[in-house]
C-alpha cells in the first residue's frame, strides 16, 4: 500500500514525509493471502513474532527452573482503609542464577471478590509508585484506580534490566547469558517485557486479582515494552501504550523529520534492542516489519495508544497511522474499531472502540488525563459502561 501524506494531514512537516510502502500484514512470507483467523494464528502471526524477535526486540526466553513469591510488606487498610497493599518479591531462578522483581500492588477494599488491575512497567523514578503514598504522582495515580474499582500495580524496570548500556545485563539476562552473544538476543526492552510476564505468573496465584482482566500500561520506553510484552504474552487482556513513539506505536517508515529515527534510538540506547536492529539504522524501508504489525499481534485484544501534541519526537500522526493499519487484523476477528480515518483533534479520545486513542494537549508524559481515559476504555470493554 502506498501512502502519500500531504500538508493537510496535520503537522507542518507532513509535506516532507516521503512516500512509503508498508509491508502487508495479511500476506504470508511466501505470498499467500491471509483471510481466516486460523491462517493468521497458525501461520502469519508466528511468522511476524519471529520477525520482530530476530530484527528488533530479540528473543523472549520462556523457561526457568523456579519462581517464588514472598510478601515483604502488607497493609490491609492502606489509603485510609480503601485499599489493601501488598509488596511482593518475585524471585525467578534458572541454572542457579536468579532475578528478583519487586511488585507493588494495591487492591480495592470494595467488597468485590476480585478486581481488574492496571500493571505499570515503571521506567521513571521509584517515587512515582510510592507504596507509602507520601508521594502522589499522576504517572501512577493509584487512588484514582482504586476509586474506580481497579487494582493497580507496578514494578521498576531496573529490577529486570538497569536502563544503562553498561549494566543492562544485571537482571533477567543473568538467567539467559546466551542471549548476550546472539545477534537476535534479548536486551533491556525485552527483559522489561519478560518481567511483566512474571508479574502475570504471580497474579495467577492472587485471588484478589481478576486474572482475565489484567491491563498492561507503559509510557514511552515502557510503552514500547508493554506492546512487545503483550504481543508475546496473550494473557494480558488489554494494553495502554503512552507516547511510545519510535519502535513503539509509531511507524518507522514515516521518517517524519522532527521524530526519532532508528539510528537515533540505536545510538542513544544501544542496550534496548537486539544487534540485528542496528542494520536498519538508515534503512527503515528494508525492515521486514513495521510497527502496525506489532499492534496487530495483540489482536483481538483492545489496545489504547496516546500521543501528546508537543511530543513530535514520538510522531503522533505515525502512531495513529499504525493503529489504523492494524484494524485489518481486528477485522479478521469481526472487531470493528471506531477510529476515524484521520487523527482526532487534540483531547478528543476515541474510547468506544477496540482500538482507542487520544492526542493529549501538552508534552511527552503520562498524566491523570491519560489515566482517566484508560479507565474509561477499560470500563467500556469490561463492563460496557
Ligand atoms: C527518549 C527516547 C524515546 C523515549 C523517551 C522516554 O529519550 O528517545 O524513544 O523512549 O526517551 O522513554 O521517555
Image (spheres, grey):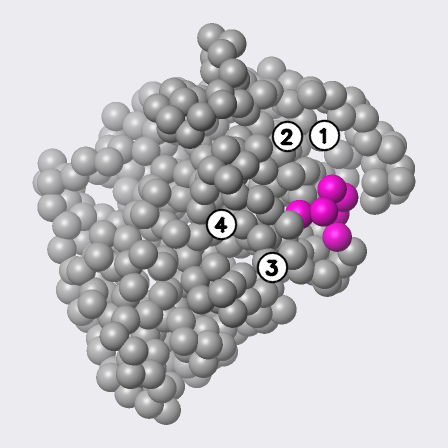
Q: Residue at x 25, y 26 (%)?
A: 178
Q: Are marks 2 and 1 in contact (CB under 8 Å)?
A: yes
Query: How far across and down, in percent of the image, does residue 269 sit?
Result: 52, 37
Report the residue marked by disc 2: 252
Q: Which residues are magenta?
A: 339-344
Query: How far across and down, in percent of the image, does residue 7 sit?
Result: 89, 37
Q: Residue at x 19, y 36 (%)?
A: 63
Q: Closest to the observer: 297 or 217?
A: 297
- 255, above or below 68, in the image: above
Q: Quadrant of the N terminus?
A: top right
Structural distance between the alpha carbons of marks 4 and 1? 27 Å
Q: Closest to the observer: 244 or 339?
A: 339
Structural distance between the alpha carbons of marks 2 and 1? 6 Å
Q: Earlier in the sequence, mark 4 or mark 1?
A: 1
Point out which mark residue 302 bears.
4
Structural distance between the alpha carbons of marks 2 and 4? 22 Å
SS class, disc 4: loop
SS class, disc 1: loop
Point out which mark residue 255 bears.
1
Does residue 97 appear in the picture of this structure?
yes
Does residue 153 appear in the picture of this structure?
no
Amino acid at each position: 500500500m502506498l501512502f502519500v501524506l500531504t500538508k493537510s494531514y496535520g503537522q507542518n512537516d507532513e509535506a516532507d514525509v516521503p512516500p512509503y510502502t508498508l509491508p502487508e500484514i495479511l500476506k504470508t512470507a511466501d505470498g499467500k493471502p491471509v483471510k481466516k483467523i486460523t491462517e493468521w494464528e497458525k501461520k502469519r502471526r508466528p511468522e511476524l513474532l519471529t520477525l520482530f524477535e530476530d530484527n528488533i526486540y530479540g528473543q523472549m526466553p520462556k523457561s526457568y527452573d523456579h519462581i517464588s513469591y514472598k510478601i515483604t510488606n502488607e497493609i490491609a487498610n492502606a489509603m485510609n482503609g480503601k485499599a489493601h497493599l501488598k509488596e511482593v518479591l518475585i524471585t525467578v531462578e534458572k541454572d542457579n542464577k536468579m532475578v528478583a522483581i519487586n511488585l507493588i500492588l494495591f487492591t480495592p477494599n470494595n467488597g468485590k471478590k476480585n478486581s481488574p488491575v492496571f500493571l505499570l512497567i515503571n521506567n521513571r523514578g521509584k517515587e512515582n509508585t510510592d507504596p507509602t503514598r507520601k508521594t502522589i504522582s499522576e504517572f501512577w495515580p493509584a487512588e484514582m484506580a482504586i476509586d474506580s474499582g481497579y487494582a493497580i500495580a507496578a514494578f521498576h524496570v531496573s529490577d529486570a534490566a538497569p536502563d544503562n548500556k553498561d549494566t543492562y545485563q544485571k537482571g533477567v539476562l543473568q538467567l539467559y547469558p546466551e542471549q548476550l552473544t546472539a545477534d537476535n538476543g534479548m536486551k533491556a526492552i525485552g527483559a522489561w517485557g519478560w518481567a511483566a510476564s512474571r508479574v502475570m505468573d504471580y497474579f495467577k496465584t492472587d485471588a484478589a486479582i481478576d486474572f482475565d482482566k489484567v491491563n498492561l500500561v507503559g509510557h514511552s520506553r515502557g510503552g514500547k515494552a508493554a506492546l512487545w510484552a503483550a504481543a508475546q504474552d496473550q494473557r494480558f487482556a488489554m494494553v495502554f501504550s503512552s507516547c511510545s513513539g519510535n519502535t513503539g506505536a509509531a511507524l518507522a517508515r514515516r521518517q517524519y523529520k522532527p521524530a526519532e529515527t532508528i539510528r537515533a534510538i540505536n545510538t542513544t540506547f544501544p542496550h534496548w534492542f537486539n544487534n540485528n536492529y542496528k542494520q536498519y539504522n538508515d534503512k527503515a524501508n528494508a525492515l521486514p516489519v513495521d510497527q502496525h504489525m506489532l499492534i496487530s499481534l495483540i489482536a483481538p485484544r483492545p489496545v489504547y495508544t496516546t500521543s501528546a501534541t508537543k511530543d513530535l519526537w514520538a510522531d503522533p500522526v505515525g502512531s495513529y497511522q499504525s493503529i489504523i493499519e492494524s484494524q485489518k487484523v481486528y477485522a479478521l476477528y469481526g472487531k470493528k474499531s471506531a477510529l476515524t480515518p484521520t487523527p482526532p483533534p487534540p483531547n478528543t479520545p476515541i474510547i468506544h472502540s477496540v482500538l482507542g486513542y487520544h492526542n493529549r494537549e501538552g508534552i511527552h508524559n503520562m498524566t491523570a488525563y491519560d489515566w482517566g481515559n484508560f479507565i474509561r476504555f477499560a470500563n467500556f470493554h469490561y463492563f460496557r459502561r
